[in-house]
Amino acid sequence: MKMQQMRYSDAFKLHVCNELKDGKWTSTREAARAYNIRPLTVANWMDALGFGHLRQRIIHVSTPKEINEEAELKAEIKRLKAQLFDVMLDQRIERAALKVACEQIGADPETYRKAVLQG
């Protein structure tokens, strides 16, 4: 099945670009979603109609301190994930050991766990 190509009037294109300029939409993607148009189409209209300077351009500037902090935070996250994994593994091992011990003495693990928690 052949895709139908949509044609938009210059007035409609200008309307969408003006909405972006006026702040109704925060990005070409948001405007495109509102009108069910591809974001690249809206971006092309903006360039063609002189609104290209309004297109969202992201430039990330970081100081050396920020770069170091980011690296430290990533390392901390990695360390915490490893610790969490270890705790979860220990917990699984303890549950399995409790289950085996309860099977050997003929007790229900949940009943035993509740009795231990109550003191």
Image (spheres, rainbow, N blue to C red):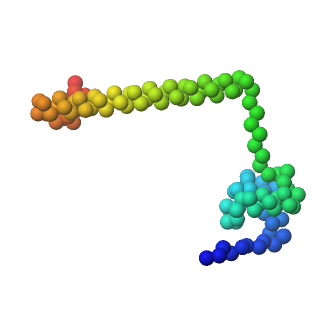
- With 11 as the anchor, is 68 left or right in this view? left
Viewport quadrant of the N terminus: bottom right
Tell me the residue at 73%/53% (across/down): 27
Query: Which corner quadrant of the image does residue 87 belong to?
Result: top left
**Image coordinates for residue 37, horizontal then vertical, percent:** 70, 65
Tell me the residue at 21%/36% (across/down): 110
Viewport quadrant of the C terminus: top left
The correct choice, above or below, for 81 with respect to 13 in the image is above
The correct choice, above or below, for 87 with respect to 9 in the image is above
**Image coordinates for residue 53, horizontal then vertical, percent:** 85, 51
State the residue lying farthest toward the front: 1
Camera-side residue of 19 and 109: 109
**Image coordinates for residue 98, horizontal then vertical, percent:** 22, 30
**Image coordinates for residue 38, horizontal then vertical, percent:** 70, 62
State the residue lying farthest toward the left: 106
Tell me the residue at 75%/62% (across/down): 41
State the residue lying farthest toward the right: 50
Tell me the residue at 71%/23% (across/down): 65
- With 40 as the anchor, is 10 left or right in this view? right
- Is residue 77 shown to the viewer in this render? yes
Query: Which corner quadrant of the image does residue 69 belong to?
Result: top right
- With 108 as the anchor, is 46 left or right in this view? right
- Is residue 118 shown to the viewer in this render? no
